[in-house]
């Protein structure tokens, strides 16, 4: 991955076969402290107008119209939404309380960016012959198994968020953005127990390594190549928002992925 910057907006970019992933930082927005500057989270205590402007700036920096970016409200679940085209109305360009609750997105359409909001959880971009996927992976979503309640816009999550998304598009490649590291993520025994079937060395005492858990689940799901940012959101307050570090009073950055090619 490499850092990119345009019009003051700074992000990490990764190239995958037939796809591009981007992971935003907090650099380049208009929000005031404690949400300074590029807070993309509408469901925070930030000024809603500032959030909309921040979203517009990010979309412009990446070369997209805000209303073309597919998004939802992350709830630490395991639901996946499949997109055949832009959302109408656009929850990214016009956020409101009607935004659907979903922790992953899929599309086979070129030029349709998929986005999840994060502030410590693991943003995972996938690509494969069947399309691209963007996932918000917190410990609950990574640990959960079974089927969730679905509506007409959603697809089954099978045996978990990562496995289902990978299977849906035949994922071969993944890009993992900045997330909280094992240096900063202390959890209880019930959380450690949730991952006991993944082997050893995913925790040091109470310090959980969400990145390693995500990597193992990707490998189990047949993903062949995995690129990671290797950056801890909690350790770098100048670059990233962190829910754990800031005791919940913080903004959101984003992970995005889009299939390359002409806009469909």
Image (cartoon, rainbow, N blue to C red):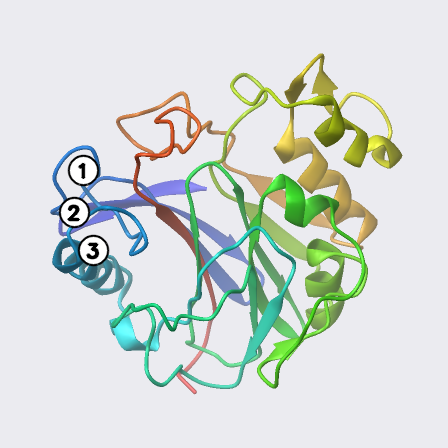
Sequence-earlier tag: 1 or 3: 1
Task: Estimate how packed mark 3 is, as few (under 14), some (14 to 19) or many (20 or more) residues with alpha carbons within 10 Å.
Answer: many
Q: Which residue is mark 2?
A: 29
Q: Which residue is mark 1?
A: 36
Instruction: Please state which of the two labelled residues, at mark 1 or mark 2, is closer to the viewer.
Output: 1
Dot 1 and dot 2 residues touching (CB under 8 Å): yes
Return the residue nearer the eye: 155 or 17: 155
Percent position (x, y) of residue 23? 40, 48
Instruction: Please state which of the two labelled residues, at mark 2 or mark 3, is closer to the viewer.
Output: 3
Q: Which residue is mark 3?
A: 51
Sequence-earlier tag: 2 or 3: 2
Task: Estimate how packed mark 1 is, as few (under 14), some (14 to 19) or many (20 or more) residues with alpha carbons within 10 Å.
Answer: many
Return the residue nearer the eye: 145 or 261: 145
Question: Is residue 237 toward the left or the right of residue 22 in the image?
Answer: left
Sequence-earlier tag: 1 or 2: 2
Percent position (x, y) of residue 80? 61, 68
Q: Quadrant of residue 200?
A: top right
Q: Is residue 23 visible?
A: no
Percent position (x, y) of residue 115? 43, 61
Spatial CA distance of label 1 from label 3 is 10 Å
Kindly state the secondary structure of the residue where label 3 is placed. Answer: helix
Spatial CA distance of label 2 from label 3 is 9 Å
Spatial CA distance of label 1 from label 2 is 7 Å
Question: Is residue 159 toward the left or the right of residue 66 in the image?
Answer: right
């Amino acid at each position: 991955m490499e850092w990119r910057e345009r019009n003051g907006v700074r992000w990490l970019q990764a190239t995958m076969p037939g796809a591009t992933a981007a992971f935003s930082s907090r650099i380049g927005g208009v929000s005031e402290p404690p949400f300074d500057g590029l807070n993309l989270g509408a469901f925070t205590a930030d000024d809603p107008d500032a959030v909309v402007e921040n979203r517009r700036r990010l979309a412009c920096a990446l070369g997209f119209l805000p209303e073309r970016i597919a998004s939802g409200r992350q709830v630490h679940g395991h639901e996946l939404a499949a997109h055949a085209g832009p959302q109408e109305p656009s929850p990214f360009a016009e956020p409101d309380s009607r935004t659907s609750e979903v922790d992953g997105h899929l599309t086979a359409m070129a030029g349709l960016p998929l986005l999840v909001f994060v502030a410590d959880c693991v943003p995972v971009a996938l690509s494969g012959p069947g399309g691209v996927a963007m996932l918000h992976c917190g410990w609950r979503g990574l640990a959960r198994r079974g089927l969730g309640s679905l509506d007409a816009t959603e697809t089954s999550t099978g045996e978990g968020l990562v496995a289902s998304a990978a299977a849906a598009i035949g994922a071969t490649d993944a890009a993992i953005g900045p997330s909280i590291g094992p240096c900063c993520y202390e959890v209880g025994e019930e959380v450690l127990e949730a991952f006991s079937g993944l082997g050893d060395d995913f925790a040091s005492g109470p310090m959980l390594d969400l990145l390693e858990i995500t990597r193992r689940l990707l490998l189990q799901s047949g993903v062949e190549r995995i690129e990671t940012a290797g950056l801890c959101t909690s350790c770098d307050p100048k670059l990233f928002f962190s829910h754990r570090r800031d005791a919940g009073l913080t903004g959101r950055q984003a992970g995005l992925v889009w299939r390359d090619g002409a806009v469909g």
